Amino acid sequence: MSEENTQPAADAATEGQAPNLTVNDLAAVANVIDLAVQRGAFKAAEAKQVGEVFDKVAGFVKHVGEQQKHLKKLHQQNLHQQKKHLPLKAKGEILC
């Protein structure tokens, strides 16, 4: 019989702290699912459920990635607009 790990994981959330899960972690989960399916780790009867979970995780990762790209683009446009409206400094003048 296999030995169970009763020790808490080294990076597990400690009391009072929320667990840290990133979009990159979820992308890694999708990759693990994909690799496990390719290697035949699941029975045929499990394929539908595994595929549905994969689709949800991969869809979420894609959606968040698109949002982040859009926000980055808006931020860059905003910075560009701010630079266009900065007052020009006369020689020797200090702007506050």
Image: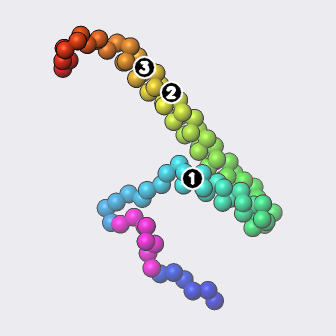
Q: Are marks 1 and 2 in contact (CB under 8 Å)?
A: no
User: From the viewer's perspective, is residue 2 above or below residue 21?
Assistant: below
- Residue at x-position 78% and y-position 60%: 38
Q: Residue furthest front?
A: 91
- Quarter in which the N terminus is drawn: bottom right
Within 10 Å of disc 1 (Cα), the crowding (few <14, some 14-19, many 20+) is: some
- Kindly report the distance in space between the C-alpha atoms of the residues bearing marks 1 and 2: 23 Å
Q: Could you tell which of marks 3 and 2 lies nearer the N-terminus?
A: 2
Q: Which residue is mark 3?
A: 80
- Kindly report the distance in space between the C-alpha atoms of the residues bearing marks 3 and 2: 11 Å
Q: Which x, y percent locates residue 16?
A: 31, 61
Q: Amino acid at mark 1?
A: Leu
Callout 3 secondary element = helix
As helix, strand or loop, the secondary structure at mark 2 comes to helix
> What stretch of residues is rendered in magenta?
7-14
Q: Main secondary structure of the magenta part?
A: loop
Name the residue located 38 percent from the left edge and 57 percent from the top edge.
18
Q: Position of residue 32 (x, y in %)?
A: 66, 60
Q: State the separation of the CA atoms marked 1 and 3.
A: 33 Å
Q: What residue is disc 2 on?
A: 73
Q: In this orientation, does residue 5 appear?
A: yes
Instruction: Looking at the picture, tell me which residue is in the foreground, 75 or 15.
Output: 75
Earlier in the chain: of badge 1 and badge 2, it is 1
Residue at image coords 64%, 47%: 58
Q: Is residue 50 left or right of residue 45?
A: left
Image location of residue 53, percent across then percent down: 66, 53
